[in-house]
Image: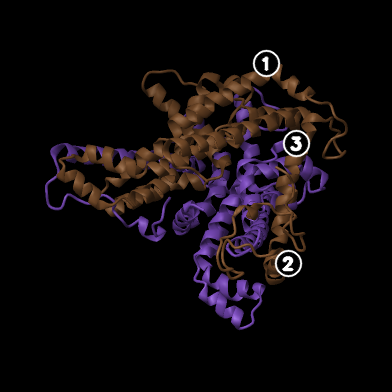
Amino acid sequence: MSSQGTVAEPPPTSTSMPATSTQAAPPGPPRRPQSRGGKTPWRVALRRDWQLYSLAVLPLLFFLIFRYLPMAGNVIAFRTFRPGGSIFGEEWVGLRYVEMFLNDPAFWNVFWNTIILGTLTLVFVFPMPIILALLLNEVRVRYFKRFVQTVSYLPHFLSIVIIAGMLMQLLSLEGTVNQIVTALGGDAIPFLQQPEWFRTVYVSSEVWQTVGWGTILYLAALTTIDPQLYEAARIDGANRWRQTWHVTLPGIRPTMIVLLILNIGTFMALGFEKILLIYNPLTYPTADVIATYLYRIGLESNNFSYAAAIGLFEAIIGLTLILSANAISRRAVGTSLW
Amino acid sequence: MVTVDPTKVADRIARPSTGGIRDSRGYRIFQVFNTVALLGVVVITLYPFVNIIAQSFSGESYIRSGQVNLIPRGFNVTTYELVMSDSMFWTSYRNTVVYTVVATLIAMVLTTCYAYVLSKKHLRGRTFLIGIAVFTMFFNGGLIPNYVLVTSLGLKNTLWAIVLPNAISVFNLLVMKSFFENLPTELEEAAKIDGLNTYKTLWYVVLPLSKAVVATMVLFYSVAYWNSWFQAFLYMDRAELFPVTVYLRNLIAGANASGAGLGSSDLAQVASNIQAVTMVLTVLPILFVYPFIQRYFVSGVMLGSVKQ
């Protein structure tokens, strides 16, 4: 969180870098200076590798300015802010803006919308690629399998603007979906104007966008399962279904867990851009999430400090979620991101 | 977590056949069901594309009365002529191309340099340098501080507002880093003995060996920049600076707001066939290159998933 991104540039002082000092120097004969894990003195490292360090200068400047400076810029959540003034605000006001959103009913509405939409995404969007990968895995005709894969990856390459446009065409009163509805004897539904339909629209379009692309890692994991395990299961009398349950699923479990952790980490960061494109004031009661709310508060009403306080709150929840999901998974099943 | 050769995955059939033993009746029924289900996936994925293509060649009155699904009604190309005669459309299109090329170029330089540095396992401070990048995957400044920063740097209404804030994707960085780590070290050592410095080694020895990953990264970045709209939407105030995605967004937003009875003065109701044509023209370059670039993307994703 600190913005010490420049310390690795030459010539840094010898103690400014804590990260590598944790590896204990191995006892015994001294190792060659370039051996991995050994502690090269900074003086030597700089003389030998200054050209490498120099290649890191511009990327580090990027991280410092466009990643770590905005993190520090979050102090405006606790300070007043004047547009055109300092990016770190004018004067301290303590927790005024935090109290403000905690007492704002509109905030709690978007907070629960975010939780509900995030949960629905996790429950419905996350398992779909696993199911599709298992189905693809049973296909014997190689060309058919490749054809389905190629087609199902396609939505991943589209701009979200295109996807929003397609959604509006399909869900309009005279669109294909409503033609089906009326053909079945129902009345045409203005899907994108009704709050009670928003979650269905959001989640199902999310499945459409991501299901194919999401299979890639599972299909790769499936190919690493030892065929002898299937052989053994068959000898033990397991039918196809039981082979899937006892061999295939345990085989892709590490992949499932890693992707689940990543999904939990992005729980709060819903498809902000998609919501921004397809929601409208009529659907705010269900469609408005923290990200869209703070966008309107900050950039349409110019309450920068208030919006920054909400954004910081959201980012901290996100970080907490991924850290705890990772810790739980390491304890419980021994798989973790780091 | 995944250690297979990415190029072989598509061809391997993971589950062995039963080796001459006939499948059970239940399994054969499942195979039929499975084929139908997968064909269903194909149809549902492709339908929206077919639908907008059909609409783009149709008359507006046929779309309004809900008669256009798979086949154009009232076939015409005048809508295409209309959209393509709008100079604003071409301005936006040219902007998209310029933004994509410049942004990809800068992103490639920064990503390649940093990935090369991070791939050197002997480097003192390497863990810290990796940490600086990886931490930003899980925590970022957020929308408002970023907006304030870009504005106060005076980047609004310039190309740099789009290029600089997203110049390095950490995911791409890690993909490149793991590729460089797996290159044989002998050639670099030979280059060093021949007296090449680090920069020349990177340029003349490492990069020529890395054409595959460089191509993959160029595609990752350029598709992402081509498709992006939000940066431009935030930081561009003048229509002549919009990329084509923002141009399209404004057409769609106008239609959506009017559909909700909320039409505001700056957003005009735009006919569905014009929207459809603009969508087709925006997506066309992606559809053209898609069959050729798809496998690079797949292999890139798998390179990136190799646990660090």
Dot 1 and dot 3 within a common chain: yes
Query: The chain coloured purple carries which letter?
Result: B
Residue at which label 1 appears = A105
Q: Colour of chain A?
A: brown
Tell me: B33 left or right of A42: left
Q: Amino acid at mark 3?
A: Asn
Q: Earlier in the sequence, mark 2 or mark 3?
A: 2
Which of the two residues, B181 or A273, is positioned nearer the viewer here? Answer: B181
Query: In x, y percent, where is residue A64?
Result: 73, 50
Query: In x, y percent, where is residue B162?
Result: 70, 49
Give how far apart the Cα atoms at labels 1 and 2 are: 58 Å
Give how far apart the Cα atoms at labels 1 and 3 are: 23 Å
Q: Amino acid at mark 1?
A: Pro
- Asked if marks 1 and 3 touch (Cβ < 8 Å), the reply is no
Q: Earlier in the sequence, mark 1 or mark 3?
A: 3
Q: Nearest to the eye among marks 2 and 3: give it.
A: 2
